Image (cartoon, helix red, strand yellow):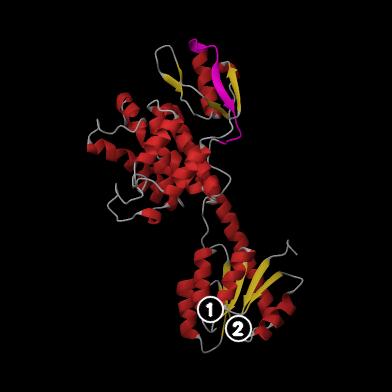
Amino acid sequence: MPDLPRILLVDDEPHIVDALSRHLRGEYHILTANSGQEALKVLQTQGAVSVVISDMKMPGMNGVSLLARVRERYPDTVRVVLSGQSDLSDSVRAVNEGRIFRFAVKPCSPAMLREILRDALDQHRLQQSEQTLLQETVRGAVTALVEILSIVRPEAFGQAVRLRRIVHELSVATGTGNSWDAEVAAMFSRIGLVVLPPQLLEDALQGRDAGMDPETVALVPQIADRLVGRIPRLETVREILRFQDRHYDGSGPPAEPRQGDEIPWGARALRLALDFDSLEARGLSPEAALGTLHDRTGFYDPALLDALSRTRVTASGTLLEVPPSRLLPGMRVLADLRDREGQLLLSRGMILTNEAVDRLRLVSRRESLPPTVRVELIEDPTQPGEAEPRTGTQG
């Protein structure tokens, strides 16, 4: 049963639902509902399905409203409507609001219904294939840009990795769930720093904007916004970056009036992570940094600030002193590594990528480096993770 395609049948007449179920049982995993509200509850408790087939005219929530909500909440689900001959105007609304894949005129024969379901499932598989390709494209673009940052500005890359880790920990601690968008935003939030000269870069990493002119301060998020805007399906990431300087009480840019939970969760988490990391970069201990954050009344989401206080007391991984030639991707660098001229090669908090390791080996061939690098062995991918970018669309 779990391997069969999942179909949800919705009709306010139980005998119709029962008849359709009998005809399709054994070929599909059938779920049923006798109203629009019940259908949404079924989807909420049972999870998304491949196809929803709904009657058009039902009391309360009709088929138009139901399928429009299904489209919004479960965009991957293919939507089919059962419509009477007199429902033409409602059918047009269903097309416009619910992006219906196919209509079936009642009464619908079992043979016709099977044909419609076969076509709908083919459409669902096509969408899944397209989404997989798009997800891989998005991940590849994100990875490429972040790896460029690691080469051009290792200091900024190190901070971006630390921010991503904090955002991930906040997601786990608060039970937020899919934090992919927020973690990608954390990595992109520092990419605008590539335009800053070394002295201004150090100020930016420590959260000291007072020495910069307003145009320079505004330029950093603008660069990130332009880059993200060119990558498909990162609309949520872009919104997070737009609100990353907004405080919980509504102060700070942009001009759009939002405060509290109206601010995207990822932006609230990123703002807190940025300020915490900047305070640590100034030399404050985690405890002192948290104390400073608590003193900034109204700046941060209280639930996130509480979660940050809890997650800062965590078990560390295995600590090692490793020769540069023995560094491996996935290790976390615990102290800055510089060459003889003071040029930063690896930044504190940076999780080594293949590219960073290769670059370091090239450097070591032409000049001497410190005999060892202090690192931590962790299970923490450099790129944001386990969850997928949100790419579902239909029609």
Q: Which mark is residue 345?
A: none
Quadrant holding the N terminus: bottom right
Residue 103 x/y as whole percent? 56, 78
Residue 292 x/y as whole percent? 37, 36
Q: Please, is residue 318 above or below residue 15 in the view?
A: above
Q: Identify which residue is drawn at 64% across, 66% down.
A: 121
Membership of 371 in magenta stretch? yes
Residue 90 x/y as whole percent? 48, 82
Could you say which quadrant of the image residue 152 lies in? Answer: top left
Task: Judge whether residue 273 can be spotted in this image.
Answer: yes
Extreme residue in the bottom direction: 86
Residue type at the position of mark 2: Asp
- Cα–Cα gap, marks 1 and 2: 10 Å
Image check: 213 left or right of 278?
A: left
Q: Residue 12 carries which label?
A: 2
Q: Identify which residue is drawn at 58% across, 17% down.
A: 321
Membership of 82 in magenta stretch? no
Residue 351 x/y as whole percent? 53, 30
User: Does label 1 or label 2 sit earlier along the sequence?
Assistant: 2
Q: Neighbour class for label 2 at 10 Å: few (<14), some, many (≥20)? A: some
Q: Please, is residue 117 above or below residue 232 in the view?
A: below
Mark 1 sits on what residue? 63
Task: Judge whether residue 103 can be spotted in this image.
Answer: no
Residue type at the position of mark 1: Gly
Could you say which quadrant of the image residue 291 lies in? Answer: top left
Which residues fall within the magenta stretch? Answer: 365-381
Q: Identify which residue is drawn at 56% across, 43% down.
A: 385
User: Does dot 2 land on a helix, a strand or a loop?
Assistant: loop
